[in-house]
Image (cartoon, rainbow, N blue to C red):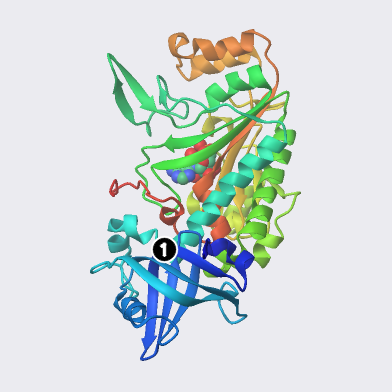
């Protein structure tokens, strides 16, 4: 009997007879031969059905298969250097399960809106399959790195009573008799977790009601947030450059085929190794001014500014020491320069812009109290957070890495919308 096989592992069955279960991706036929391109969720492979080598019934069944019809087939695995994955199947039997009618996404060009309306089907496409497989690898690698380096995964709540990153981009919802907000970052809870477990991370969806319609912003995105007790900003950046390099190396090792499908220039990724360059916010402002951008000290960078800076580097670059006024209340001021904080954004190269935001957190109870007053943060909402500074406070740091931004860079994709199975965008909540 033919063994059930997966296309991604087809090489393990070279020369043997296997059963494959999947969907018809594409078909070419001449009178005596059908070339079926089958996908099974793990990959794509060409299956050749030759008249006379299968029963007449099966040859006819193969001829009736339409795009996205579901089927089972058996056949012999043959190594073939000309085939895309290195193998093809000489078919012995074909069993259609359902003949699909009028699949809407045909091989012709479709507009983005049409494809987005059909996102539930579009994810079957080869390019989407490659991107979302790479997304999986990015997440798996990131967790692997952290797990191997003494971090404990301790997740943060999604329903929260107060904002972490400012109130303008909060989604509000009812929580029985009171209001709750969808999480914009797990960081404050992460800080509590770090005081309990030392090195922690949380991973989950993050919600930002950003009214800006850019190719870098999702309304719902996934963020991985490590937080470390007894850690300063230098060490924080070292962890970031190691983590990002590890992620890229794992994608290169495990997803070569997918990178080839999307035609990514991997030589650019092969150079991603620590150390990453560091650039102060002050110097970044000078670079932008020299390049003719209208910007002054104290302004935040827009996407074009980030692009301009990151295009100058072949590795991700840390932009450090942003103005205190621009950043969150919990960031530690730079000693002797209170107008800037100990923080860094990591900008991906090739113009991809920010993928990580991180900082050293204020540990001093007095300074934290001052900051909370300046930012009008109530004792009622943030009392528990203050207590972290009262009961055994220590220097600590952490960061958040946006999964979809990272995948956009690694896959060399223009727009963030294809980096998540079902994107939530300013004007899109469906499907
Ligand atoms: P930006 O200024 O680009 O909007 P931010 O400064 O608000 O980002 P952080 O709060 O530092 O970002 O979040 C950490 C990381 O989360 C970012 O570096 C990015 O990778 C990711 N991220 C933030 N906002 C979004 C978004 N709307 N869509 C996708 N990823 C995001």
How many other residues sit within 10 Å of disc 1, few (<14), some (14-19) or many (≥20)? many
Q: Is the residue indicated by label 1 positioned so its CB lies within 8 Å of ligand 1? A: no
* Residue 233 percent coordinates (x, y): 70, 32
Q: Nearer the viewer, residue 154 or 410?
A: 154
Secondary structure at badge 1 equals strand
* Residue 247 percent coordinates (x, y): 64, 49
Residue drawn 32% across and 27% down?
Answer: 172
Query: From this viewpoint, which residue is outermost toward the left?
Result: 102
Residue drawn 43% across and 62% down?
Answer: 21
Dividing the picture into quadrants, the one containing residue 332 is: top right
Q: Is residue 104 left or right of residue 396?
A: left
* Residue 384 percent coordinates (x, y): 52, 11
Q: Give the residue pinned by disc 1.
A: 22
Dividing the picture into quadrants, the one containing residue 206 is: top left
Q: Nearer the viewer, residue 35 or 406?
A: 35
Query: From this viewpoint, which residue is outermost toward the bottom?
Result: 31
Residue 3 visible in rendering: yes
The answer to whether 118 is drawn above or below residue 422 in the figure is: below
Q: Is residue 388 left or right of residue 109?
A: right
């Amino acid at each position: 009997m033919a063994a059930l096989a997966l296309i991604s592992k087809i090489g393990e069955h070279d020369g043997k007879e296997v059963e494959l279960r999947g969907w018809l991706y594409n078909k070419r036929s001449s009178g005596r031969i059908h070339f079926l391109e089958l996908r099974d969720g793990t990959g794509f492979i060409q299956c050749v059905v030759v008249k006379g080598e299968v029963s007449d019934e099966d040859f006819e069944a193969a001829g009736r298969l339409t795009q996205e019809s579901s089927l089972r087939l058996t056949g012999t695995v043959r190594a073939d250097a000309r085939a895309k994955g290195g193998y093809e199947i000489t078919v012995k039997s074909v069993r259609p399960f359902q003949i699909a009618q009028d699949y809407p996404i045909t091989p012709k060009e479709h507009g983005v809106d049409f494809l987005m309306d059909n996102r539930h089907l579009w994810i079957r496409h080869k390019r989407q399959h490659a991107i979302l497989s790479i997304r999986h690898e990015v997440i798996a690698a990131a967790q692997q790195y952290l797990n191997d380096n003494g971090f404990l995964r301790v997740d943060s709540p999604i329903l929260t009573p107060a904002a972490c990153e400012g109130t303008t981009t909060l989604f509000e919802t009812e929580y029985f008799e009171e209001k709750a907000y969808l999480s914009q970052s797990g960081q404050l809870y992460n800080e509590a977790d770090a005081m309990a477990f030392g090195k922690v991370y949380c991973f989950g969806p993050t919600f930002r009601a950003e009214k800006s319609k850019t190719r870098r912003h999702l309304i719902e995105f996934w963020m991985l947030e490590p937080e470390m007790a007894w850690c300063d900003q230098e060490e924080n950046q070292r962890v970031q450059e190691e983590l990002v390099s590890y992620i890229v190396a794992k994608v290169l090792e495990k997803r070569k085929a997918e990178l080839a499908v999307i035609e990514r220039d991997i030589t650019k990724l092969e150079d991603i190794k620590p150390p990453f360059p560091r650039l102060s916010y002050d110097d970044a402002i000078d670079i932008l001014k020299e390049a003719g951008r209208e910007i002054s000290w104290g302004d935040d960078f827009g996407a074009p500014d980030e692009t301009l800076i990151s295009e100058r580097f072949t590795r991700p670059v840390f932009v450090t020491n942003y103005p205190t006024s621009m950043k969150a209340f919990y960031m530690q001021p730079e000693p002797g320069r209170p107008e800037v904080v100990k923080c860094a954004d990591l900008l991906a190269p090739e113009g991809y812009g920010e993928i990580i935001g991180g900082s050293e957190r204020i540990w001093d109870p007095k300074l934290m109290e001052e900051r909370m007053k300046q930012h009008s943060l109530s004792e009622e909402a943030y009392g528990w957070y203050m207590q972290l500074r009262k009961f055994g406070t220590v220097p600590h740091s952490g960061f958040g890495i946006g999964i979809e931004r990272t995948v956009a860079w690694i896959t060399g994709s223009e727009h963030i919308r294809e980096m998540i199975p079902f994107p939530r965008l300013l004007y899109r909540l469906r499907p």
